[in-house]
Image (cartoon, grey):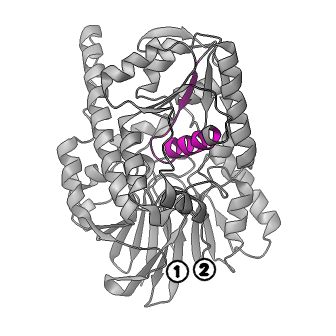
């Protein structure tokens, strides 16, 4: 009658979300994400479980650090059912195809360098486009929020709005045989942002896994961050430069476009070129337009009247030659390009052409994990290597954390305050030092709510009941 959980990712680090829940022999995987930053080598570790044994994969949302190894799981024998919301299914598919393409191109580059230098050949990509398309066959069940679904073995699951990105969810899983419940938070959203609704609240539970990405601090208010972005743009244009915004193709790019449209309509944005230079972000934007039922009330009312993701200065550049042409624009441009952590994508070409120019600005609007080029620059690097060339960092660097799609400390505390006494609280999806800070805050604020607050280790397996 055991219930057990294996922690196979996002344990004392931020990426690679992957948890295996075993309820009386029914094995349910929650997320199967890719590792990024310092943890990226873990992508090549053999799954510590047999993918053939997994009956269900619950996908909380479509960020690559939550869905990025699904094609590998399928390649290794997974034949179960993937359960997620409609937008998560749509967006995950374009994210996975893009991931396969990026890995293939990266492998080719490393392969050529290894041959030239006489080094050992790099490991092959985790999967290819064929594996991605094959994995689409297993997206079997699309669920709505707050609608219970009964799985085999008398197990009930309920998706609730996590307020993180379009279609994101936290999931409540209940064993109806022994009346035990566990909740996985997925990634919880930063409240009072545009486009999507604020997160819903959890019900009472026996066990709870909560993300801690920003467990150590709070964000600036969204309005403060909007003003900071506007000031960065105006200051850069006054200096005669360009604004570079490394952005995740999903959610952040759409949010920045939404804000720039507001600036334009309010007469605050000078005449300029706004380039969305990311084929993936352009595809994601089209999916956003296809799912207005997931918008918050304000955005839905705008959608009824007009496109909330369009205004006259905006230019979509899908073609490679169009992207290269942006480098001819020396001032008065806002360039939004992926990826958000500077670990690849078209943003690197724009950095190579603008990072050394003191009149330009580099504006970070998302989390930069340890081991990424973005984190290196945020931490004050004077020089960086891009495409084998040393580039001095002379641009003005802004870090605006109020655009984060992750809940800050106060929001995590607010969310967790809605559960009653919990047998065991697991802290996941965060860096160890941030978890320790959050654990102390929880112990001080909720003295009798949790019988135990636990920080699991990578590949640790724990019996719950």
In the rendered image, which residue does mark 2 sit on? 203
> Which is more N-terminal, label 1 or label 2?
1
Q: Is residue 15 left or right of residue 123?
A: right
Q: Measured from the top left, where is residue 433 in percent x and y?
A: 68, 45
Q: Is residue 97 left or right of residue 349?
A: left
At x 49%, y 28%, the residue is 342
Q: Is residue 136 above or below residue 140?
A: above
In space, the residues marked 2 and 1 are separated at their CA atoms by 10 Å
Q: For mark 2, give the secondary structure.
A: loop
Q: Is residue 229 left or right of residue 22?
A: right
At x 59%, y 39%, the residue is 260
Whether residue 244 is in magenta: the answer is: yes
Q: Measured from the top left, where is residue 64 in percent x and y?
A: 41, 47
Q: Is residue 462 above or below residue 460?
A: below
In the rendered image, which residue does mark 1 sit on? 181
Q: Nearer the viewer, mark 2 or mark 1?
A: 2
Whether residue 298 is in magenta: the answer is: no
For residue 57, what is the image quadrant? bottom left
Q: Nearer the viewer, residue 194 or 451?
A: 194
Q: Nearer the viewer, residue 210 or 82?
A: 82
Q: Quadrant of the N terminus?
A: bottom left
Label 2 close to label 1 by CB (< 8 Å): yes
Q: Measured from the top left, where is residue 156 in percent x and y?
A: 42, 83
State which region is magenta. 242-263
Q: What is the crowding at mark 2: few (fewer than 14 residues within 10 Å), some, or many (at least 20)?
A: few
For residue 380, what is the image quadrant? top right
For residue 147, what is the image quadrant? bottom left
Q: Is residue 103 above or below residue 384?
A: below
Q: For mark 1, give the secondary structure.
A: strand
Q: Is residue 28 visible?
A: yes
> Which mark, residue 453?
none
Q: Measured from the top left, where is residue 455 in percent x and y?
A: 61, 58
């Amino acid at each position: 009658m055991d219930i057990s959980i294996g922690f196979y990712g996002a344990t004392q680090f931020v990426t690679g979300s992957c948890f295996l829940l075993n309820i009386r022999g029914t094995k349910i995987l929650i997320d199967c994400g890719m590792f990024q930053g310092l943890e990226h080598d873990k992508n090549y570790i053999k799954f510590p479980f047999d993918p053939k044994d997994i009956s269900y994969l619950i996908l909380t949302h479509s960020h690559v650090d939550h869905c990025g190894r699904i094609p590998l799981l399928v390649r290794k024998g997974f034949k179960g059912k993937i359960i997620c919301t409609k937008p998560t299914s749509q967006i995950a598919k374009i994210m996975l195809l893009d991931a396969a393409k990026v890995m293939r191109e990266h492998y080719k580059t490393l392969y050529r360098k290894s041959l030239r230098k006489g080094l050992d050949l790099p490991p092959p990509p985790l999967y290819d486009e064929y594996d991605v398309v094959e994995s689409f066959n297993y997206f079997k069940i699309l669920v709505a929020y707050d609608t219970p679904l009964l799985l085999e073995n008398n197990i009930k699951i309920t998706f609730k709005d996590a307020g993180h990105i379009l279609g994101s969810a936290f999931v409540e899983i209940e064993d109806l045989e022994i009346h035990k419940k566990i909740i996985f938070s997925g990634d919880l959203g930063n409240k009072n942002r545009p486009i999507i609704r604020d997160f819903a609240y959890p019900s009472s539970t026996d066990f709870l896994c909560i993300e801690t990405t920003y467990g150590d601090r709070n964000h600036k208010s969204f309005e403060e961050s909007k003003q900071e972005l506007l000031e960065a743009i105006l200051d850069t244009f006054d200096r005669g430069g360009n604004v570079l915004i490394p952005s995740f193709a999903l959610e952040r790019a759409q949010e920045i476009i939404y804000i720039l449209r507001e600036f334009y309509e309010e007469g605050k944005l000078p005449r300029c070129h706004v380039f969305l230079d990311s084929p993936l972000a352009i595809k994601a934007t089209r999916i956003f337009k296809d799912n207005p039922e997931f918008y918050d009330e304000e955005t839905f009312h705008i959608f009824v009247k007009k496109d909330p993701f369009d205004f006259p200065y905006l230019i979509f550049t899908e073609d490679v030659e169009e992207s290269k042409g942006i480098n001819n624009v020396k001032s008065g441009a806002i360039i939004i390009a992926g990826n958000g952590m500077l670990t690849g994508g078209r943003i690197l070409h724009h950095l190579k052409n603008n990072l050394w120019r003191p009149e330009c600005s580099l504006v970070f609007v998302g989390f930069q994990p340890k081991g990424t080029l973005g984190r290196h620059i945020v931490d004050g690097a004077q020089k960086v290597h891009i495409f084998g060339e040393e580039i001095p960092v002379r641009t003005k660097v802004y870090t605006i954390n109020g655009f984060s799609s992750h809940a800050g400390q106060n929001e995590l505390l607010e969310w967790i305050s809605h559960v009653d006494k919990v047998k065991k609280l697991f802290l996941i999806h965060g860096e160890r030092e941030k978890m320790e800070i959050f654990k102390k805050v929880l112990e001080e604020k909720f003295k009798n709510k949790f019988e135990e607050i636990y920080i699991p280790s990578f590949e640790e397996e724990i019996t719950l009941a």
